[in-house]
Image: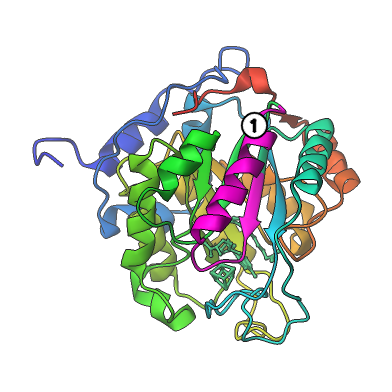
Amino acid sequence: MNPADPAPHVEAAHAASRPAPSDTQASSLPSPVTASPAWTYDAVAAIYHQPFMDLLSQAQNVTRAHFDANTIQLSTLVSIKTGGCPEDCGYCPQAARYHTGVSADALMPIEEVVAAARAAKARGATRFCMGAAWRSPKPRHLEAVAQRVAAVKALGLETCATLGMLADGQAEQLKAAGLDYYNHNLDTSPAFYGKVITTRVYDDRLQTLQRVRDAGINVCCGGIVGMGESAQDRIGLLCQLANLQPYPQSVPINDLVKVAGTPLADTPDLDPLEFVRTVATARTIMPQARVRLSAGRQAMSASTQALCFLAGANSIFYGETLLTTANPAWDADRHLFDQLGLTAETRSDFHYASA
Ligand code: SAM
Ligand code: DTB
Ligand code: SF4
């Protein structure tokens, strides 16, 4: 960052103090994400730790400057290759080494993937995310996933995949098949990472994210909170995300789903207000990103979810399962949207042209 540039927190404060457009003026078509400023740890910590009402007010103003505050993007997630993963991620029910009752399945046939995508579209989802429990996909996996991506794209859905670390050329192959987003989470701060995962390092994740960006695929990158990390670690993660150039177009914030058999199964609950602070800070420092209230909603009260939306979350996973664990029922989410007067984003609201 040029030293003459205003400090990022000053820019954020300006953005937040701009009069918020009224709902009728608010455009649901904000401009594309552009290069982000360099965030210091202290600037992000100052946002995160400010009085709760100030934080929420700032985050809500930032939301209204860029989005229709009552519109939520719906992504449906399907596990196309479940279980048997060689990695040791301490939170994950799909790691082969933990006894979680998740069996290792073969890749889902393309017809089943297309049927799931059709059903998701009929329910109102605009993005379909395919997850695979791989450390990194082999060339034959990539070919098979590319076919599934092309078939889902042909239904008129946005496509997303999360397949682990990508080798040279694989992101380009996915892009050519029509992939719009690649999900690859940094998960936590660099300092806490080694306490949760030992089979890869932070730089491996950053390298895949670079490959995704270089291929012109939108980045979906976030993390998990509630893993026993400190507030410093949550801030450290947010700082890493905001300093990606550009910051991710999509930022999933997961609250740990505690699965019996995983090393993190008995982690004490995170205070929901800390979760809300994490969402509000993500919104404030990555103003044009879709911030997704991701895993963990099943165990979350309606009031906490409402606070997350107030804090700027404007995307959810919509569907009764995540990858292997439960997510709120369709009806429960429709009821929540009715209670809060929220509407689902439609394709005509899309603001990111496929890169
Ligand atoms: N294997 C690939 C990878 O790790 O990148 C893709 C699938 S992996 C399951 C996708 C993401 O799911 C992880 O990065 C993690 O953030 C999230 N995740 C996995 N288990 C979770 C849990 N128990 N609670 C919350 N999030 C979880
Ligand atoms: C993300 O950030 N969260 C999703 C998606 N990206 C792939 C995964 C959540 C998984 C929760 C545990 C499970 O269902 O297995
Ligand atoms: Fe494997 Fe991904 Fe689970 Fe880690 S998070 S064990 S890499 S499926």
Magenta-colored span: 129-155
**Location of residue 43 with respect to 31 vertically, above or below:** below
Q: Residue at x 75, y 76 (%)?
A: 102
The coloring applied to the image is: rainbow
Residue receiving disc 1: 153
Q: In which quadrant of the rendered view does residue 73 lie?
A: top right
Q: Residue at x 56, y 66 (%)?
A: 134
Q: Amino acid at mark 1?
A: Lys
> In the rendered view, does 42 fall on the left or right side of 5?
right
Q: Inspect the magenta stretch and tell me whether residue 138 lies in it.
A: yes
For this rendering, which residue is in front, 120 or 280? 120
Please tell me whether mark 1 sits on a helix, a strand or a loop: helix
Q: Position of residue 352 (x, y in %)?
A: 50, 26
Q: Inspect the magenta stretch and tell me whether residue 221 lies in it.
A: no
For this rendering, which residue is in front, 302 or 99? 99
Q: Residue at x 72, y 65 (%)?
A: 106
Residue 276 visible at all: no
> In the rendered view, does 74 fall on the left or right side of 34?
right
Q: Residue at x 49, y 57 (%)?
A: 139
Q: Position of residue 206 (x, y in %)?
A: 34, 58
